[in-house]
Amino acid sequence: MMRTKTLVQVIVVSSLSFLPMPSSAQESGERLAKQALEECDSGRLAMDRATRLAHFQQGQILGERAVAADEGNADTHFALFCNLGELLRIDGESFTSLFGLRRMMNELDRALEINPAHIDALSAKGTLLVKLPRILGGDAEKGEALLEHVVSRAPKAVNARLSLAKVRCEHGRHQEAVTLATDALALAQKHNRPDFIPEARAVLEQLQANAAKASHKAQF
């Protein structure tokens, strides 16, 4: 009887090793999303194309695993979007792959479907709407409104301020553009965002030059 009981215990214990691991031991979508975003940030900071590409490709892999682990988490979709977007524009601002653009936008839209108040996703959506031509889904008016919303709700939103500054410049509102870009640079420096500091500085310098030209023309 004792031997039979022991045999049953061995069988039960052995069978447990083949059962699915508890959720706490499975891959965390949140953790993977964080790692994917870190790869995206590292890629933006890299100086050479090969290193940028490696970071974004690894970020895409992590982002896809994050979505698979937690499809209902907006952060997992945004992390994948970030790396897909950077891969698309690794050789410039133009999007050359329509399929890649659609996939990227699907991830961004899914993030906003899950969490309509996701500030980073709203900022990215606004930026893309003002940047993309209408044939590819762009909507400058809607994008500008989204960026204004983000700037009013998120004191630390650097990218939204830079994107809105460019829009203001295009509309001839040069002083507003310079103010927004100045704020963006100050925020990037204050909150230690090296991935945004070079871009913010370059945008500010360009907007200051545009403002000076506009002022000069207005005098004559």
Image: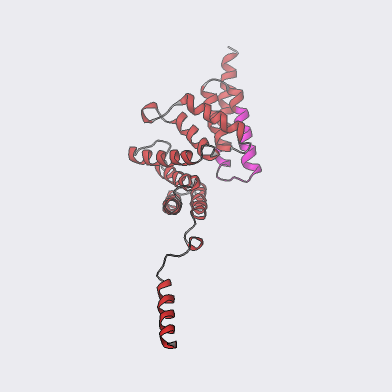
The answer to which image quadrant residue 209 occupies is top right
Residue positioned 53% across, 26% down in the render:
145
Point out residue 172 in the picture as x, y percentages from the top left corner: 54, 20
How many numbered marks have been drawn onto this rendered protein structure?
0
The answer to which image quadrant residue 117 occupies is top right
- Of the pair 21 and 139, the residue shown nearer to us: 21
Point out residue 118 in the picture as x, y percentages from the top left corner: 53, 39
Point out residue 219 in the picture as x, y percentages from the top left corner: 60, 13
Residue positioned 46% across, 47% down in the render:
72
Residue 153 versus residue 168 in the image, above or below: below
Residue 15 versus residue 161 in the image, above or below: below
Residue positioned 42% across, 29% down in the render:
138
Instruction: Point out the stretch of residues depicted in magenta.
Output: 178-199
Image position of 153 (left or right of 108): right
The magenta stretch spans residue 186: yes
Q: Residue furthest right?
A: 190
Point out residue 191 in the picture as x, y percentages from the top left corner: 64, 44
The quarter in which the N terminus is drawn is bottom left
The quarter in which the C terminus is drawn is top right
- Of the pair 187 and 46, the residue shown nearer to us: 187
- Of the pair 165 and 208, the residue shown nearer to us: 165
